[in-house]
């Protein structure tokens, strides 16, 4: 797999939430500063609408997370593809967290070099993650500026005081190639949960359900005749207090006659005050991941103290290093240029690669602004941001989930779908296409990325959304915040049907598509395949990308017919998973 695309090619469209002028690439920064080596953490441009408050006070506390480089990266990428390929010697293999760290993690000498450097610089609380990929530490702004040859500036933005690094983060030359990113140097870039509520409205369109229940989605997506997800543990990312979402999950389960699933909250991130809880998001995720699955062996909340990029890196890392949940939904995201600039894209991709090698899957919402990436105040408005995909849906080691408008028959069974106009999708300008996607679409030429988003889709239009139980009663909620947990719940059923032997979902989904009835399309330069495992939406677009035969950057491979997917994936199921 190729490295991330260079920033220079996308500056013209990166203005969005930040100003794009004056950004230097890593090589330029390194050349300009003798004795220092570049990292992936770039300077953060002045946030749009922000008022500069001057340099951040030297005594201000700042917590940082350093991402360390994986070893043997090309071998790791080959393994992830081979684990899902019947002809490969790696077929059916998976790594445990311990064996992954031994094979691909940083060396002990590299970890020691980083921790020793931080301690010499006066940082406290220096801790290393179990996989050796993340090193956390706390210092002052003055220590951060000195340790990473950067500068931190305070801003007033949206009624709050924030800070950001106005120059790129560097490390001493002795740590070159070891430290790939320094997270925590800004609290401007963060993912946003963005469920779209339609309140208690109803629709008068024939056979269009205003608010589906879990059983409604189960029937619509043909899940009622297959195994439940009872043998599979799943998870979701959340932030803040979860007392109310868990209580409301119990109310929803009772109201819909569903089993009470075991719930565990795994906390991550920097200890301290929790962020705004966005309860409706965490309620939506838990109720419709477990509801679509009907039952799961365990449900985990990976609860972050904030949705800042540095904190989310720790949260994703905890999911991978614990390796207790088979799959996770992330109903959140940010404009991918932000994750690229602060280095979290590179750091998180390493963690997602570990999860994939361990047979875990992350399903992430592709966003609710059509072919534009999400900006504050524009959620649900198509193409209101710059033409760019959302991260982490654009990661090659993640299954990006787009959105549709679902229509069912009078009996509740599937009728047809159209693309939801606000469903996120497009071509990443930073991430490159993984091998399993390259088999469906041609690899594009040029210097920018060619990873296409989404991979699949599910219902997301708030008009045909989910009935979500809140502290004030049930309301209708939609967005790709719904489609990601629906995909997670359906995948839990597929995994349970085969005793959790399928591993990372993305290669299997593309292989199922290519095992359909396929014809090479000269016009589209791609394989156009049809299979009962995927519903092809009939029409629609998300602004730039229309619904076309075969894969498209609107709804990906299509939506899931759960029963047909269970049947179609059978030839791809390894006889047994075996540890590396």
Image: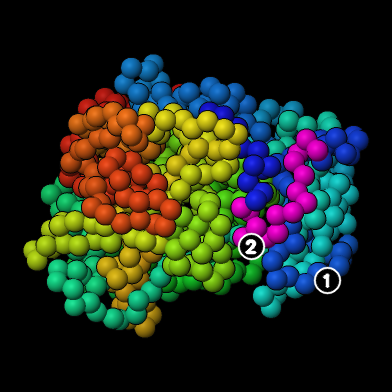
The residue indicated by pointer 2 is 17
Outermost residue on the bottom side: it is 472
CB atoms of marks 1 and 2 within 8 Å: no
Residue 53 numbered tag = 1
Outermost residue on the right side: it is 34
Q: Is residue 31 visible?
A: yes
Query: Residue at image x 53%, y 22%?
Result: 75
Does 516 sit left or right of 243 as displayed?
left
Disc 1 and disc 2: Cα gap in Å? 19 Å
Q: Is residue 277 above or below residue 472?
A: above
Does 10 sit left or right of 125 as displayed?
left
Does 535 sit left or right of 350 as displayed?
left
Q: Residues within 10 Å of mark 1 (few under 14, many from 20)?
A: few
Magenta stretch, main secondary structure, is loop
Q: Is residue 566 visible?
A: no
The quadrant in which residue 217 appears is: bottom left
Residue 171: x, y in percent?
81, 39
Query: Residue at image x 38%, y 74%?
Result: 197
Residue 580: x, y in percent?
45, 24
- Dot 1 falls on a residue whose secondary structure is strand
Residue 342: x, y in percent?
68, 50
- Dot 2 falls on a residue whose secondary structure is loop
Magenta segment includes 20: yes
Give the extent of the magenta segment: 13-28
Residue 182: x, y in percent?
72, 46
The quadrant in which residue 175 appears is: top right
Outermost residue on the left side: it is 411
Between disc 1 and disc 2, whose residue precedes?
A: 2
Magenta segment includes 348: no
The quadrant in which residue 523 appears is: top left
């Amino acid at each position: 797999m190729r490295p991330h695309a260079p920033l220079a090619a996308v500056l013209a469209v990166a203005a969005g939430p930040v100003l794009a002028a004056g950004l230097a690439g890593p090589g330029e920064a390194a050349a300009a500063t003798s004795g220092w080596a570049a990292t992936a953490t770039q300077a953060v441009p002045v946030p749009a609408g922000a008022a500069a408050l001057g340099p951040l006070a030297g005594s201000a506390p700042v917590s940082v997370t350093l991402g360390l480089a994986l070893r043997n990266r090309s071998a790791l990428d080959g393994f992830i593809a081979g684990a899902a390929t019947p002809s490969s010697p790696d077929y059916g293999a998976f790594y445990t967290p311990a064996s992954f760290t031994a094979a691909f993690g940083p060396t002990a000498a590299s970890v020691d070099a980083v921790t020793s450097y931080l301690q010499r610089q006066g940082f406290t609380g220096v801790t290393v993650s179990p996989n050796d990929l993340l090193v956390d530490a706390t210092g002052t702004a003055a220590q951060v500026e000195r340790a990473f040859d950067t500068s931190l500036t305070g801003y007033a933005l949206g009624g709050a005081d924030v800070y950001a690094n106005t120059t790129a983060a560097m490390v001493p030359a002795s740590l070159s190639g070891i430290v790939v990113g320094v997270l925590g140097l800004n609290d401007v870039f963060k993912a946003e949960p963005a469920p779209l509520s339609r309140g208690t409205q109803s629709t008068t369109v024939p056979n269009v359900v205003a608010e589906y229940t879990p059983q409604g989605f189960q029937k619509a997506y043909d899940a009622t005749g297959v195994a439940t997800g009872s043998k599979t543990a799943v998870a979701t990312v959340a932030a803040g207090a979860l007392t109310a979402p868990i209580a409301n999950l119990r109310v929803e389960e009772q109201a819909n006659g569903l089993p009470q699933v075991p719930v565990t909250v795994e906390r991550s991130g920097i200890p301290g005050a929790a962020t705004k809880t966005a309860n409706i998001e965490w309620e939506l995720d838990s109720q419709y991941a477990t509801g679509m699955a009907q039952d799961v062996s365990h449900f985990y909340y990976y609860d972050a103290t904030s949705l800042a990029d540095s904190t989310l890196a720790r949260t994703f890392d905890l999911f991978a290093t614990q390796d207790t949940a088979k799959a996770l939904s992330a109903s959140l995201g940010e404009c991918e240029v932000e994750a690229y600039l602060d280095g979290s894209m590179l750091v998180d991709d390493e963690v997602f690669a570990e999860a994939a090698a361990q047979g875990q899957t992350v399903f992430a919402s592709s966003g609710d602004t059509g072919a534009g990436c999400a900006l504050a105040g524009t959620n649900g408005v198509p193409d209101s941001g710059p033409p760019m995909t959302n991260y982490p849906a654009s990661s090659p080691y993640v299954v990006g989930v787009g959105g549709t408008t679902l229509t069912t028959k009078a009996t509740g069974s599937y009728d047809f779908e159209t693309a939801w106009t606000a469903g996120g999708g497009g071509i990443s300008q930073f991430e490159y296409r993984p091998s399993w996607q390259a088999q469906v679409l041609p690899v594009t030429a040029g210097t920018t990325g060619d990873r296409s988003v989404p991979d699949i889709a599910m219902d997301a239009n708030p008009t045909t959304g989910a009935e979500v139980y809140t502290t004030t009663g049930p309301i209708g909620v939609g967005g790709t915040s719904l489609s990601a947990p629906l995909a997670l719940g359906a995948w839990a059923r597929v995994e349970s049907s085969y005793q959790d032997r399928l591993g990372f979902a993305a290669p299997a989904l593309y292989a199922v598509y290519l095992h359909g009835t396929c014809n090479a399309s000269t016009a589209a330069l791609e394989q156009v395949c049809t299979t009962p495992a995927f519903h092809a939406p009939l029409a629609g677009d998300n602004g730039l990308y229309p619904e076309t035969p075969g894969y498209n950057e609107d709804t990906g491979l299509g939506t899931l017919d759960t029963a047909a997917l269970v049947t179609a994936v059978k030839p791809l199921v390894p006889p047994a998973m075996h540890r590396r």
